[in-house]
Amino acid sequence: MNTLQELQQQLSQCRMCQDRFGFEPKPMVWGRAEAPIMLIGQAPSRTVHLTRRPFNDASGKKLRRWLGTGEDTFWNQSLLYITAVGRCYPGSTGKKGGGDFPPSPICAPNWLAKEIPLLEPQLYILIGSHAARYCFGNKKLTELVFEELYYRGKPAFVLPHPSPLNIKWFKDHPHFEEMVVPSLQAAVQHALGDRQKAA
Ligand code: SF4
């Protein structure tokens, strides 16, 4: 597999987790090679699975507010490359407040590990503990959120998952928005630069 286009084509046909999920997986593929920002999330929600648009849900609404981007910029595939540790909706636990199952453990080694080296973004934004662990090992998410980070030599942010179910983290860290969001928005604007106007 040599090019991003080849990888994306093969990824979109992946059904390796069909038995694990008990339904047909629908891999989410979103972004072009030239995108200056790479966003690495956890796994698509059911709404994203159905609508085929990443972060097209309550989490996405909050995330776009943090990033300071409107929908046009956020979903412009030449500006934001949106990937994830798990590329398919993993199904719901069915428990009240339990959310979805974690991303399939076989996904990132098979796809994300090959995808990341094919891109050269100016900024990495990692959403939630699964993405943080993938890129920064076992370091605690909360420490990473408040640290100045670099990934593959470029500025990086680790964000708590914006899911409405992640109530406790936000209760425990009421100053998150005040402390992190202004520098996040500045980094996003810097990475987008003139590309945003040209797009
Ligand atoms: S979660 Fe990943 S490995 Fe599993 S079917 Fe989807 S793309 Fe393939």
Image (cartoon, grey):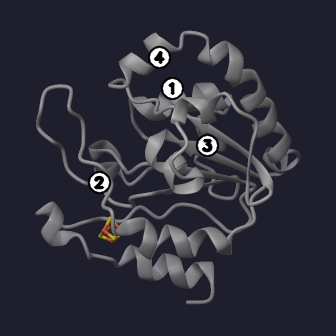
Residue 12 location in percent, x, y? 40, 74
Q: Taking 185 as reference, is 116 left or right? A: left
Residue appearing at x 66%, y 42% in the figure: 73
Q: Amino acid at mark 4?
A: Phe
Label 3 near label 4: C-beta < 8 Å? no
- Relative to the observer, which residue lies in front, 63 or 20? 20
Q: Please tell me whether residue 37 is drawn above or below residue 161 in the rendered image.
A: below
User: Which is more N-terminal, label 3 or label 1?
Assistant: 1
Label 3 crowd (10 A; few <14 / some 14-19 / many >=20): many
Q: CA distance from mark 1 to mark 3?
A: 12 Å
User: Which is more N-terminal, label 2 or label 1?
Assistant: 1
Label 4 crowd (10 A; few <14 / some 14-19 / many >=20): some
- Relative to the observer, which residue lies in front, 148 or 103? 148
Q: Which residue is mark 1?
A: 62
User: Which is more N-terminal, label 2 or label 3?
Assistant: 3
Q: Amino acid at mark 3?
A: Phe
Of circles 1 and 3, the one toward us is: 1
User: Which is more N-terminal, label 2 or label 4?
Assistant: 2
Q: CA distance from mark 1 to mark 2?
A: 20 Å
Q: Taking 122 as reference, is 40 left or right? A: left
Residue appearing at x 30%, y 43% in the figure: 47
Q: CA distance from mark 3 to mark 2?
A: 20 Å
Q: Amino acid at mark 1?
A: Lys
Quarter location, residue 81: bottom right
User: Which is more N-terminal, label 4 or label 1?
Assistant: 1
Q: Secondary structure at mark 1?
A: helix
Q: Which residue is mark 3?
A: 74
Q: CA distance from mark 4 to mark 3?
A: 23 Å
Q: Amino acid at mark 2?
A: Tyr
Q: Secondary structure at mark 3?
A: helix
Label 2 near label 3: C-beta < 8 Å? no
Q: Which mark is residue 170?
A: 4
